[in-house]
Amino acid sequence: MASDHGYIRDYWPKLPDNTEYDGKRLLALVRTGNSPFKHWDVNSLIQEVEGITGTQVLDIPFVSKGSNNYGFYLDMSDGQHLVARLARGDFEADVCTLVQPIPAILASRLIYYRSPVQHTGPHFEIPKDIAGRRLMIYERAEGENNVWCKLSSEGKASLLSQAARIRASLFNLPLPADFTETWLLPRIFDFMPKELPLPIAPSREFWVAMFTSRINATIGEGGDMIGWEDDHNTVGPAALKAKQSLLRFIPHMLPADDDEEASLYRLVLDHGDFGIHNMSITVEATGRPSITSLYDWETGNIVPVILSDPEMALLVDLVTDAHGNPSITRVSEDVTPEYCQEYMEYASQYIKALYEYAPYFKRAIQAGKDARHLWFALKGWRGDDPEGFFGELGAWAERRLGEMGLRDQT
C-alpha cells in the first residue's frame, strides 16, 4: 500500500549564528563542518548521488524547501545539472512515471527513485543518514521560474498560452485504473474515511457516496471531536444542523452525466499547485519565453472533471468564477484598480487559451457549480471555528435547496 507519510516534518535549518539559512553555499559549509542540516548528514546524500550517477558533485548552488521536501540543486563533474529531492511521498514518483511520456505536459525527467529503508531495532535518536527518506533525482531543466516581471506584454501572453496548453493536456489525460486505485483516496484532503464507500468509478454514484462519506467523516455526532485534535473542538448544534442540510443537498447538487462522449465524472490528475513558481522557463534574446518543465507535484490529487481546478498562480491566482468566466483571487487589499484590471486581462488570456485546448473544461465548471463550491470550501478549511464555518455552509445548502424548490423534501 503506497503511503504519503514517512517521517516527522523537517524544518528549515538555521546557521550557527541563529540566522535562517539562505539555501546557498551548502557544499562549502559541509566541507568546513558547518552544515546547517544538523539532523542528518549531507555527505550521505552526496555519496549516494555520486554512486548512482558515477560522477562527482562539484557544487550545490541552491537548496529549496517545499512543504514536504528538500530540493538540492547539483552541478556534476560530467556537466549534468540535477535536482535531488528528499521527499515524504511516493506519489510524485508515480506521477512522473505516468506523465513523462506526454511531451505536452513537460514534466521534469525523473532519472532515479528509491523508497525509504526502515531502520530495525530500538530508535533512541533520529538516524543521521538519508536511507529513511525517499530520494528522487531529476534532470534539472534549463531556465528559472522568476521571469514574469521581466517579460513584455507579448511575452506574458505567450507564457500564458503555453501554460494553458500544459494545463489542458493534464485535463485531457486518461488515467490508468491502477493509478487511480492507488492514489485517489490518499491524495484527497484531510478528514476523510479510511476506506472508500464504493469501488472507484468515474460515475455520479461514486461521487455522491464520496461527498456523503466526506461530510460524515468530518462532522460526527454531537460532542464528537471535529477538525484537528490539538484544537479541542467538538461538534456543536450549528455543525450538526449543517450536516443534515449538506447530506440532503448532495444528491441534488451533482449533475446527471448525460454526455456519453465527455463524461463529467471522468477522473483527471490535478497538479495541485499549478503556477509559474513550479515551472522552469527560458527567455530567448528576442524576449520570447519557453516553459521547459513543470515540477513539484507533491500536492496533486485525482478528481472528476467537474472538480478539476483551472487555477494558474502568478502574482495573483488566475481562476474562473462559478460560471466559468475568468476571475482572479489572492489579491492584496492595497493594490490599485489598474493592477486588478491588468491581471483580469491575464486571466482572460489564460482561460481563453485553456478552453481552446480543452473545450469541455468550461462545461464541467458550469455543471459542477454547487459541487465545486462545497468541495473547495472543505478543501480550504483548516479546522478552525467549525460552528461558524459549517453554519455558513449549511445555510448555503438550505438556500440552494430552496432555489430548487426542494427545501422541505428529504
Image: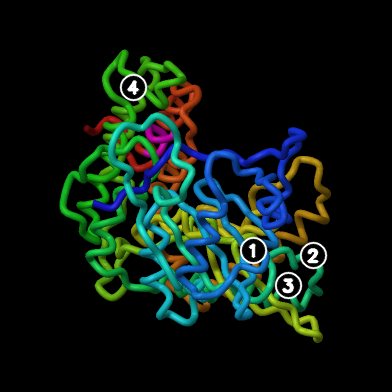
Report, in whole angstroms, how far the alpha carbon at label 3 lies from the one at label 4.
48 Å
Residue carrying label 4: 241
Q: Nearer the viewer, mark 3 or mark 4?
A: 3
Quadrant containing the C terminus in the rendered view? top left
Image marks 4 and 2: residues in contact by CB distance under 8 Å: no
Q: Nearer the viewer, mark 4 or mark 2?
A: 2
Image marks 1 and 2: residues in contact by CB distance under 8 Å: no
Residue carrying label 1: 276
Look at label 3 and name its amino acid: Lys
Query: Which residue is outermost to the bottom?
Result: 286
Dot 4: few (<14), some (14–19), or many (≥20) neighbours within 10 Å? some
Give percent across and percent down for residue 118: 32, 46
Q: Is residue 401 magenta?
A: no
Question: Which residue is drawn at the image coordinates 41% and 40% (left, top)?
Answer: 7
N-term mark: 3 or 4: 3
Dot 3: few (<14), some (14–19), or many (≥20) neighbours within 10 Å? many
245 up-or-down from 3: above or below: above
N-term mark: 4 or 2: 2
Which secondary structure lies at badge 1?
A: helix
Residue carrying label 2: 149
Which secondary structure lies at badge 2?
A: helix
- Magenta region, residue range: 396-400
Q: Relative to 259, is 393 on the left or the right?
A: right
Residue carrying label 3: 156
Look at label 1 and name its amino acid: Ile
N-term mark: 4 or 1: 4
Q: Relative to 202, is 297 on the left or the right?
A: right
Image marks 2 and 3: residues in contact by CB distance under 8 Å: no
